[in-house]
Amino acid sequence: MLRFRSGFTMIELIFVIVILGVLAAVAVPRFFATRADAKVSSVAMSIGQGVTEVVEYAVSKGSTQSDLTSMSNAIKDLVDSGRAHKVNGEDVIVEINNIDCIKIAIDTQNGNDDLNVSLISSADSACRALQKSIRKKVYSIPLRGRVVVQ
């Protein structure tokens, strides 16, 4: 009659631990990369929404204000959440990983108001991913004043 022993041998346990270690080594970096991608996407969506709100404000009021956060809830949320900060009380600098990445400003030269979104040079990979999501060809957007077509 055969008798089966209960439990696992040391070799079997070592194999299970090695397999779990390999799975963790693959899964953990992907998890953190996914979180970073989600953060970049969230900030990019907030910038796009903020630009839309500023344009809508300028169209509906016929004027702009110097403070971007007073014209856009999305930009205000970026500043309030610490993902952006104001410079000179007017311009907004968007950050990723505490690195300045994108500047949003209203240029009021010559009596015209233009919304400018400019990229700040950075070697940070998350910042560069955010910058790639911004279509530079769209900016600057004339908000008020005369548009001269050349």
Image (cartoon, helix red, strand yellow):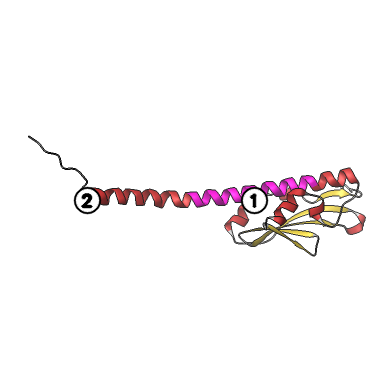
Q: Is residue 135 visible?
A: no
- Residue at 78%, 49% (x, y): give it: 72
- Residue 73 percent coordinates (x, y): 76, 49
**Is 107 situated left or right of 10 in this image?**
right
Which residue is most to the left?
1
Q: Which residue is mark 2?
A: 11
Q: Nearer the viewer, residue 14 or 142?
A: 14
- Residue at 70%, 53% (x, y): give it: 78
Q: Earlier in the sequence, mark 2 or mark 1?
A: 2
**Is 49 situated left or right of 125 in this image?**
right
Q: Nearer the viewer, residue 73 or 59?
A: 73
In the rendering, which numbered label is found on residue 132? Answer: 1
Q: Which numbered disc, 2 or 1, marks the residue closer to the eye? A: 2
Residue type at mark 2? Ile
Q: Nearer the viewer, residue 79 or 60?
A: 79
Q: Dot 2 surroundings within 10 Å: few (below 14), some, or many (20 or more)?
A: few
| Numbered disc total | 2
Q: Main secondary structure of the magenta part?
A: helix
**Is 85 situated left or right of 107 in this image?**
left
- Residue 136 percent coordinates (x, y): 72, 50
